Amino acid sequence: MFTTVKMAITMKYVTALSSPELTTLKEAVAHHSNHRVRVRSHAILLSSRHYSIPQLADIFDIDRDTISHWIDLWKTKGLMAVFDARRSGRPPILTDDELQRLTDLVQNEPRQLKKAHAQLTLETGKKFSLQCLISALKKNGFYV
């Protein structure tokens, strides 16, 4: 004899969105530069339309626990839940003063990046690649 056990499945959804939240999420889905923000925003919008977690996991090809976590974050953080938190990373090799010196060197001789690299290496005593120098210049608005 087999017995069937019915488990109560609690459905987790995002509650009704306010008009500003709805507008912001739609704009994020359509125009945000970060793909993860677009996906999370879309998932929150669909959840508010009562798409289930398994449906959302299938649509976005993401683990259901991740979708559930996004919904939990939405309930606690609201709109900030769709954005990535700041992450720690490698500390910058060059200080702000060294970046200013680099900028001055490149402005004086824009076609001599290797020369600026050598000069800054001599002045600071730090070893860093030419690619690091180029990245620092790009962050400061130079087109390299």
Image: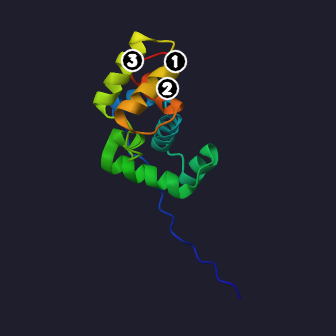
Rendered image: mark on residue 19: none
Rendered location of residue 131, percent (x, y): 53, 31
| Label 3 residue SS | helix
Work out whether residue 22 can be spotted: no
Numbered marks: total: 3
Rendered location of residue 34, percent (x, y): 49, 32
Q: State which tag comes first along the sequence, 1 or 3.
A: 3
Are the residues flagged by discs 1 and 2 in contact, CB closer than 8 Å? yes
Residue 56 versus residue 134 in the image, above or below:
below
Residue to which mark 1 is pinned:
144
Colouring chosen for the image of the structure: rainbow
Q: Residue at x 57, y 73 (%)?
A: 6
Q: Point out the residue furthest to the left here.
A: 97
Q: Point out the residue furthest to the bottom here.
A: 1
| Label 1 residue SS | loop
Q: Point out the residue furthest to the front here.
A: 122
Q: Residue at x 54, y 46 (%)?
A: 51
Residue to which mark 3 is pinned:
105
Work out whether residue 144 can be spotted: yes
Viewport quadrant of the N terminus: bottom right
Q: Residues within 10 Å of mark 3 (few under 14, many from 20)?
A: some
Residue 34 versus residue 66 in the image, above or below:
above
Are the residues flagged by discs 1 and 3 in contact, CB closer than 8 Å? no
Residue to which mark 2 is pinned:
134
> What residue type is disc 3 on?
Leu
